[in-house]
Amino acid sequence: MPSQATPAHPFRRILLVGFMGSGKSTVGPLLAEALGWEFKDADRVVETVEGRGIAQIFTDDGEAEFRRVEHRVTMELLREDDLVVASGGGWPCREQRMEAIGDDTLSIWLRVGPERSLERVQAERHRRPLLDVDDPLAVIDELLADREPYYSRARWSVDTDRHSPLEIVRRVLEHLRTEPERPLHT
Ligand code: S3P
């Protein structure tokens, strides 16, 4: 994919939001490479800062502590330029999170249905404590219903059930090039 080191659009960074298994950490690096930008996954930054995995943070200190670190890390990432950031699936889902994102950040919601989400996270469920349960599909259904109103505040959205990661990158780049001020929903 051709690199576009000096893209003609108003954004200094892109924030990918969406549920677990929506493809944030697959699409993110591809998009970053195509833009000549860096990619950072907020979950991985949290793990580096904390020196332990997310499941371990949940076990040792509880979800509330994870959410505090996650928020601090995400806000720091949102101050960096030329960066594609994948937020954790739960980060956008509090009041004033999506609203606090500045105009120079392009937020993109990667939409995913419950079955596809489970299919994609199945092998790595132990890394996602919320889904490491007997009936993950029931949890996914419930969380998705609660969270979609928050994710839907993203400026653009892309259906990852219908489009492959490369197709998503192609569409995003094309839209950035042609009419970045107009919302993309595809
Ligand atoms: C979570 C999603 C995970 C991770 C943590 C909690 C959530 O990130 O932050 O397990 O609440 O949806 P991914 O969306 O990158 O899997």
Image: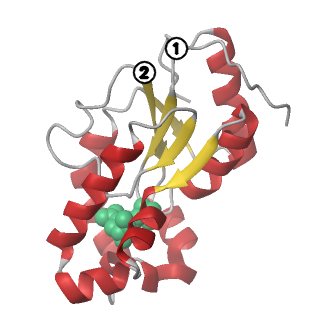
Please identify the quarter of the rendering in which residue 45 is found: bottom left
Please identify the quarter of the rendering in which residue 179 is found: top right
Label 2's element? loop
The answer to whether residue 165 is seen in the rendering is: yes
Q: Is mark 2 within 8 Å of ligand 1?
A: no
Side of 60 where 121 appears, left or right: right
- Counting from the top left corner in percent of width and height, residue 139 is at 29, 72
- Quarter the N terminus occupies: top right
Q: Is residue 139 above or below residue 45?
A: below
Mark 2 belongs to which amino acid?
A: Asp
Q: Residue furthest right?
A: 2
Measured in 3D between alpha carbons, the distance from the residue under mark 2 to the one under mark 1, in whole angstroms, is: 6 Å
On the image, numbered disc 2 is attached to which residue?
Answer: 104
Q: Residues within 10 Å of mark 2 (few under 14, many from 20)?
A: some
Label 1's element? loop
Mark 1 belongs to which amino acid?
A: Pro
- Quarter the C terminus occupies: top right
On the image, numbered disc 1 is attached to which residue?
Answer: 10
Q: Which residue occupies 42% across, 21% down? A: 104
Depth check: give the residue in front, 180 or 121: 180
